[in-house]
C-alpha cells in the first residue's frame, strides 16, 4: 500500500519510510506548503497513494482542505490527525497486509 503523509517534521521522514518498508508498504511525503507549485505537488501525491494521512496541527487550512477534497474526488481513504508519530505509523502498517488495504 502507498501511504501519503501531508505535513509533519521532515527529520522523521527516514524513520517513517523505514517502518513502512519493513511491513511491505511505501510512504510519500508532502510538506503541506501549498504556495507556488506546492498545491500541484500535493494533488499529484494524493492521486498516487492509497491512504492519505493529513496532520492538522502543522498544516494550514488550505492544505488540509485541498488534501481532503482531492482524496475524496480520487476515492482515496483519508485520515486526519492532530499529530503523528513513527509509533503510530508502525501500528497502522502492522495492521494492513503488505501490498494492499
Image: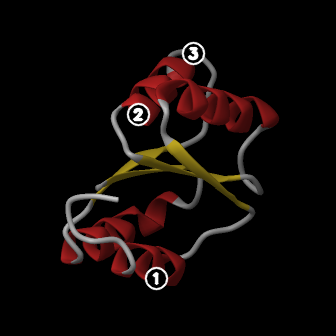
Q: Nearer the viewer, mark 3 or mark 2?
A: 2
User: Splitting the image into 4 quarters, where does residue 36 fall?
Assistant: top right
* Mark before the other along the chain sequence, 1 or 2: 2
* Mark before the other along the chain sequence, 3 or 1: 3
Image quarter of the C terminus: bottom left
Q: Nearer the viewer, residue 69 or 42?
A: 69
Mark 1, Cα crowd under 10 Å, few <14 / some 14-19 / many 20+, is: few
Tell me: 74 left or right of 21: right
Q: Secondary structure at mark 3?
A: loop
Mark 3, Cα crowd under 10 Å, few <14 / some 14-19 / many 20+, is: few
Residue shown at 36% from the left, 42% from the top: 49
The Cα atoms of the two marked residues, 1 and 2, are separated by: 23 Å
Rendered view: 86 above or below 4: below
Q: Which residue is mark 2?
A: 45
Q: Secondary structure at mark 2?
A: helix
Image quarter of the N terminus: bottom left
The spot of residue 12 in percent (x, y) is: 45, 68
Q: Nearer the viewer, residue 25 or 10?
A: 25
The Cα atoms of the two marked residues, 3 and 2, are separated by: 16 Å
Which mark identifies residue 70?
A: none
Q: Nearer the viewer, mark 3 or mark 1?
A: 1
Mark 2, Cα crowd under 10 Å, few <14 / some 14-19 / many 20+, is: many
Residue shown at 53% from the left, 79% from the top: 88
Q: Which residue is mark 3?
A: 36
User: Splitting the image into 4 quarters, where does residue 82 fall?
Assistant: bottom right
Q: Which residue is mark 1?
A: 91
Amino acid at each position: 500500500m502507498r501511504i501519503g503523509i501531508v505535513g509533519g517534521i521532515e527529520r522523521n521522514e527516514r524513520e517513517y519510510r523505514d517502518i513502512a518498508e519493513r511491513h511491505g508498504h511505501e510512504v510519500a511525503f508532502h510538506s503541506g506548503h501549498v504556495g507556488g507549485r506546492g498545491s500541484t505537488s500535493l494533488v499529484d501525491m494524493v492521486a498516487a497513494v492509497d491512504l492519505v494521512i493529513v496532520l492538522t496541527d502543522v498544516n494550514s487550512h488550505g492544505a488540509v482542505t485541498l488534501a481532503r477534497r482531492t482524496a475524496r474526488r480520487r476515492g482515496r481513504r483519508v485520515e486526519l490527525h492532530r499529530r503523528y508519530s513513527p509509533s503510530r505509523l508502525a501500528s497502522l502498517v502492522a495492521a494492513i497486509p503488505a501490498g494492499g488495504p
